[in-house]
Image (tube, rainbow, N blue to C red):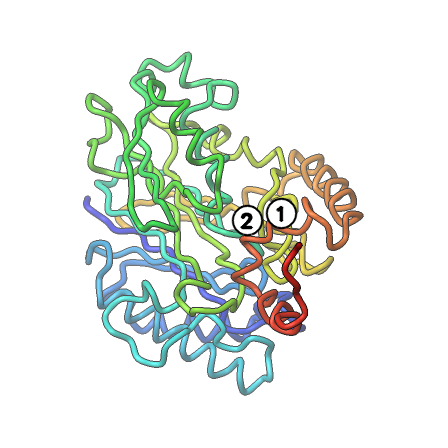
């Protein structure tokens, strides 16, 4: 069965600052999506990470469907309206325009979608992060699909030996390149090691795989809010879909990279590096310095387009050490205060509120003799 899985998220208002999405907003989004169940939507779920509302939808309308994106826009607009009534912080923050033009891309929300031929057993893991940027997925995606020290199947499962093809986006020059592993691993790392500029958008199987080579096995959102808004309005807070098992990395191999809380850009005011902490949904409510950055993992089985789940994959004591390590890293980074490397580079600060500070000093700089 050909089915499309669409994951669309937006910050429509936070309860007590940038802390969490209140249940009332999730309920109103659920009610909007429920109206379309059995018509445009096969199934759906609603969740959150921090102050970001997440819509998970299955359908047969394909990627970038105006109808599906219109449903998401309607849900976000109604949730934002309630957020304004409640006086929530940043109500409608990620809804950068009033008019919907057939696609939410460029309007603020983050989008990850894939159209696939559903396998007899189709496990998927949906990741969502708060207080970070699209490039935060680079390290995990590389480890899942290209690092044999993470994914044992790359060595011991013949169906994985051909490797994978990565679609990498240049987020500054607005172009893309396709690179294959293992043969182009070093060139790939040369790009994705700079996550502020290069981000993995999709991962595909290579010819001869049990999955058709034009079907993605992982998709990430790559929207950059400051570019769409022309100013800093919050961090991008990306989402990602990863398929697993039967010729792909196992679910445990998909989750394993997050046992290491790698450093990502974002955190307070989108201006600081901090550890990406894997948490259960109940703990997806960042507080300390508006963080540290959080990531959740929702596991589903797709069957006939229906979502069986979710399983809260990081709500597991096996990730306790990762959380403890993240707290230790947070302590270390926080001690740097306003100094790099805790604060992001000066170039990246140009997209925050820093230019407003520099304007005050414009007339006071003198040329060096």
- Residue ID at (39%, 47%): 220
Cα separation between marks 1 and 2: 6 Å
Q: Secondary structure at mark 1?
A: loop
Q: Crowdedness of circle 1 by 10 Å Cα count: few (<14), some, many (20+)? A: many
- Residue ID at (24%, 47%): 115
Q: Is residue 255 left or right of residue 241?
A: right
Q: Nearer the viewer, residue 97 or 335?
A: 335
Q: Earlier in the sequence, mark 1 or mark 2?
A: 1
Quadrant holding the N terminus: top left
Q: Quadrant of residue 320?
A: top right
Q: Which residue is mark 1?
A: 279
In the image, which disc is placed on residue 305?
none
State the count of labels: 2
- Residue ID at (59%, 58%): 270
Residue located farthest toward the front when viewing the structure as drawn: 369
Q: Are marks 1 and 2 in contact (CB under 8 Å)?
A: yes
Q: Crowdedness of circle 2 by 10 Å Cα count: few (<14), some, many (20+)? A: many
> Picture coordinates of residue 175 (x, y %)?
29, 46
> Picture coordinates of residue 214 (x, y %)?
20, 36
Q: Is residue 226 left or right of residue 66?
A: right
Q: Is residue 26 above or below residue 189?
A: below
Q: Is residue 71 above or below residue 337?
A: below
Q: Which residue is mark 2?
A: 296
> Picture coordinates of residue 96 (x, y %)?
41, 74
Residue located farthest toward the bottom when viewing the structure as drawn: 85
- Residue ID at (36%, 37%): 243
Q: Secondary structure at mark 2?
A: strand
> Picture coordinates of residue 176 (x, y %)?
29, 42
Q: Nearer the viewer, residue 91 or 192?
A: 192
Q: Is residue 227 above or below residue 123?
A: below
Q: Is residue 233 left or right of residue 342?
A: left
Quadrant holding the C terminus: bottom right
């Amino acid at each position: 069965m050909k089915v499309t899985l669409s994951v669309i998220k937006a910050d429509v208002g936070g309860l007590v600052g940038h802390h969490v999405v209140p249940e009332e907003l999730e309920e109103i989004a659920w009610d909007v999506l429920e109206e379309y169940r059995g018509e445009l939507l096969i199934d759906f779920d609603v969740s959150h990470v921090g102050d970001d509302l997440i819509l998970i939808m299955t359908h047969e309308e394909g990627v970038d469907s105006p109808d599906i994106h219109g449903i998401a826009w309607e849900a976000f607009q109604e949730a934002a309206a309630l957020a304004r009534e409640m006086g929530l912080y940043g109500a409608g923050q990620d809804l950068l325009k009033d008019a919907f033009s057939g696609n939410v891309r460029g309007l603020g929300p983050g989008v990850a979608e894939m159209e696939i031929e559903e396998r007899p057993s189709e496990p998927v893991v949906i990741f969502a992060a708060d207080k970070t940027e699209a490039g935060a997925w680079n390290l995990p995606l590389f480890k899942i699909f290209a690092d044999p020290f993470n994914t044992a199947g790359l060595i011991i499962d013949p169906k994985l030996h051909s490797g994978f093809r990565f679609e990498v986006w240049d987020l500054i020059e607005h172009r893309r390149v396709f690179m294959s592993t293992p043969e182009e691993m070093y060139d790939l790392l040369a790009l994705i090691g700079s996550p502020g500029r290069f981000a993995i958008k999709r991962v595909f199987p290579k010819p001869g795989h049990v999955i058709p080579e034009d079907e993605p096995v992982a998709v990430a959102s790559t929207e950059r809010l400051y570019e769409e808004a022309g100013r800093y309005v919050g961090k991008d807070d990306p989402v990602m879909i990863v398929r697993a098992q039967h010729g792909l990395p196992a679910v445990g191999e998909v989750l394993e990279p997050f046992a290491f809380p790698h450093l990502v850009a974002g955190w307070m005011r989108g201006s600081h590096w901090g550890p990406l902490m894997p948490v259960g949904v109940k703990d997806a409510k960042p507080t300390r310095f508006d963080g540290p950055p959080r990531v959740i993992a929702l596991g589903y089985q797709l069957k006939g387009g229906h979502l069986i789940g979710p399983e809260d994959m990081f709500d597991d004591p096996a990730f306790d050490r990762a959380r403890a390590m993240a707290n230790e890293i947070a302590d270390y980074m926080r001690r740097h205060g306003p100094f790099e490397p805790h604060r992001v580079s000066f170039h990246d600060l140009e997209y925050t509120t820093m230019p407003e500070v520099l304007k005050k000093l414009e007339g006071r700089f003198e040329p060096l003799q």
